[in-house]
Amino acid sequence: MKFRDLCWLWGHPEGRYNGLFGNERESRMTPMEFCSYLGIRNTFMVPVEWEINRRQYNKSFKRLRSVGWECNNSALDGTESLGVLLEEAKEFTNINCVVFDDFKGPFCDQISIDNLYKAIDRAHNNEVKPLDVWMVLYTNQFGKDEKDDADFQPYMDAFDGIIMWTWKERDVPLIPEKFEILKKYTPNTRRMIGLYLYNFGENKQATADAVKFQLDFAYDKIMKGEAEGVVFHTNTMADLDYEAYDVALDWMEEHGDDNVPEINL
């Protein structure tokens, strides 16, 4: 397996962040265009409250290896909204996972652990195919209060995998320490590392040094079998001449075809 086979896009509708988070430029790059641009074959698709034509996106993803959709509402309604995705998965066979975005915080406070487990059980056991279930967790949401971490542990245990993200670039130096803490809480849970190619947390461009640091870190953890992928956020600035994207592209051209040992988490 090549390193690029373990790389994912965190995909949004094209233009979703035009005029937002300090970005005054207008992007038109689609999620599938980004996958082609970076040479990767996996994506999570997250509409971020925009009305979209899901079928059109699924058709564009036809040549991808793996596709996952955000499915937060399934934890609120106790599985009902998973039905749409399962119907899509009948036709689009590369749909093989779901993700709960921004899980910890106000959203998590709205759901019961019972409803969450119902949704996850439905994802795993249904008439179409088993779907892996991933959760987004930020580095500023754990490793600060042991009681809070212990209270959250049953939620962490429910998921197949956790994607660790760092919201503000100034916290990037904390990633190695935070990842070690995450490992402690996820002995039987798969892990991926999220990487922002735009500094949404501070409303400005990401820097080349921060992006390269995170890519090198993710590469090291994947090669050691401690993580199984890296998730790039996002397509919506990729065609705007921001240096972080150029750094990621150059880095992938150098390392994307490196062979990765078999992942055994």
Image (cartoon, rainbow, N blue to C red):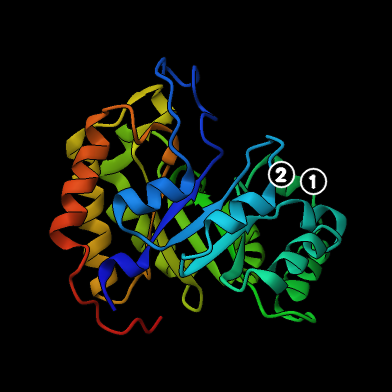
Q: Tell me the quadrant of the picture where the C terminus can be found.
A: bottom left
Image x and y of residue 200, in percent: 43, 29
- Quarter of image, res 191: bottom left
The residue at the point 50 percent across, 46 percent down is 11
In the image, is residue 58 above or below residue 250?
Answer: below
Give the amino acid type for the residue marked by disc 2 in the picture.
Answer: Phe
- Dot 2, crowdedness within 10 Å: few (<14), some or many (≥20)? some
Indicate which disc residue 107 carries.
2
In the image, is residue 109 above or below residue 217?
Answer: above
| 145 relative to 208 in the view: left or right | right
The residue at the point 37 percent across, 84 percent down is 264
Is 1 or 166 nearer to us in this picture? 1
Q: CA distance from mark 1 to mark 2?
A: 5 Å
- Determine contact: label 1, label 2, CB under 8 Å: yes
Is 161 or 139 nearer to us in this picture? 161
In the image, is residue 259 above or below residue 153?
Answer: below
Give the amino acid type for the residue marked by disc 1 in the picture.
Answer: Gln
- Please name the residue that numbered disc 1 is placed on: 110
Q: Secondary structure at mark 2?
A: helix
| 116 relative to 22 in the view: left or right | right
Is 246 or 189 nearer to us in this picture? 246
Image x and y of residue 66, in percent: 50, 68
- Dot 1, crowdedness within 10 Å: few (<14), some or many (≥20)? few
Does any portion of residue 49 appear in the rendered image? yes
